[in-house]
Image (tube, grey):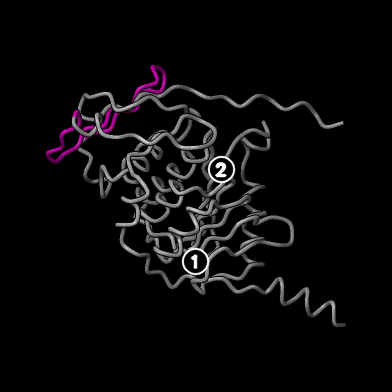
């Protein structure tokens, strides 16, 4: 019998832009600076962390105060059209699918074999302490060209992706060098986050939606689903993934 796991935590965190309340989000109370920077970037509010004049994290009161250095009408933005995202946690995006189609197409020469993605997905799982402790957390990780992975976890799959993007932005990492792996379903708004940052390869432990695949093909992003066990599914055709798993299985069957 497996030992009893603890319950995952979630906290309401309210984000303020220039003193104006934007929204309240359900988050895991860790890596909130990464989340704030990643979320503000993936929603098009900032282009770089240097666009922030100030960022105050009040985790105890569940509040984050972001002050933008440039002229920004926070009240007008907060009243804009919101799209509530599908999945766990309370997610909000201000981008529609039409907006995402206007994003710049991704230009990355990063390639990977399927066995490499499976290996990194396994390492990712082993380096996800909150999931191992609770069985109820999502995670996202980036893999650099040296194979080093950085993991962020959250109750919400969107939040985990924002956190790992925020980390990459703070460290000044080049998106062309990185692969994004996530435990969550790749929906259009998840694909939008990846596209906004510039990932060329996005892998998930589970599925991608039809809308996400359509956008990925349009924006030249390789999407790989069901990255687990010994197989994976490449949804797109950007030429960045070498399917050495199918070739290996086919070779074994002929011996």
Mark nearer the viewer, 1 or 2? 2
**Residue designated by label 2:** 139
Residue 39 got which mark?
none
Label 2's element? strand
Disc 1 from disc 2: Cα separation: 20 Å
In which image quadrant can residue 224 be found? bottom right
Q: Is residue 239 magenta?
A: no
**Residue designated by label 1:** 145
Chain part drawn in magenta: 54-75
Above or below, comparing residue 84 to residue 109 in the picture: above
Q: Residue at x 87, y 31 (%)?
A: 1
Q: Residue at x 87, y 82 (%)?
A: 255
Percent x, y of residue 84: 42, 34
Q: Residue at x 56, y 57 (%)?
A: 203
Q: Tag 2 or tag 1, which sits nearer the N-term? A: 2
Percent x, y of residue 219: 39, 63
Q: Residue furthest bottom?
A: 255
């Amino acid at each position: 019998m497996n030992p009893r796991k603890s319950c995952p935590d979630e906290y309401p965190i309210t984000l303020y832009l220039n003193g104006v309340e934007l929204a309240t989000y359900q988050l895991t109370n860790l890596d909130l600076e990464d989340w704030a920077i990643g979320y503000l970037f993936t929603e098009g509010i900032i282009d770089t962390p240097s666009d922030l004049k100030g960022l105050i994290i009040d985790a105890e009161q569940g509040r984050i105060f972001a002050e933008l250095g440039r002229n920004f009408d926070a009240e007008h933005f907060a009243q804009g059209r919101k799209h509530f995202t599908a999945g766990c946690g309370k997610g909000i995006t201000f981008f529609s699918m039409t907006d995402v189609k206007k994003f710049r197409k991704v230009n990355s020469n990063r390639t990977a074999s399927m066995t490499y993605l499976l290996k990194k997905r396994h390492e990712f799982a082993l380096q996800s302490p909150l999931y191992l402790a609770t069985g109820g957390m999502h995670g996202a990780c980036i893999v650099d060209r040296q194979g080093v992975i950085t993991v962020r976890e959250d109750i919400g799959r969107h939040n985990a992706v924002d956190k790992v993007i925020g980390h990459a932005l703070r460290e000044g990492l080049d998106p062309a060098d990185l692969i994004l792996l996530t435990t969550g379903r790749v929906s259009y708004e998840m694909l939008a986050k990846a596209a906004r940052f510039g990932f060329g390869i996005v892998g998930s432990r589970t599925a991608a939606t039809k809308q996400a695949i359509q956008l990925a093909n349009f924006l030249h992003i390789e999407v790989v689903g069901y990255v687990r066990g010994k197989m994976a599914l490449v949804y797109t055709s950007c030429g960045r993934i070498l399917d050495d798993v199918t070739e290996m299985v086919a070779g074994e069957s002929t011996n």
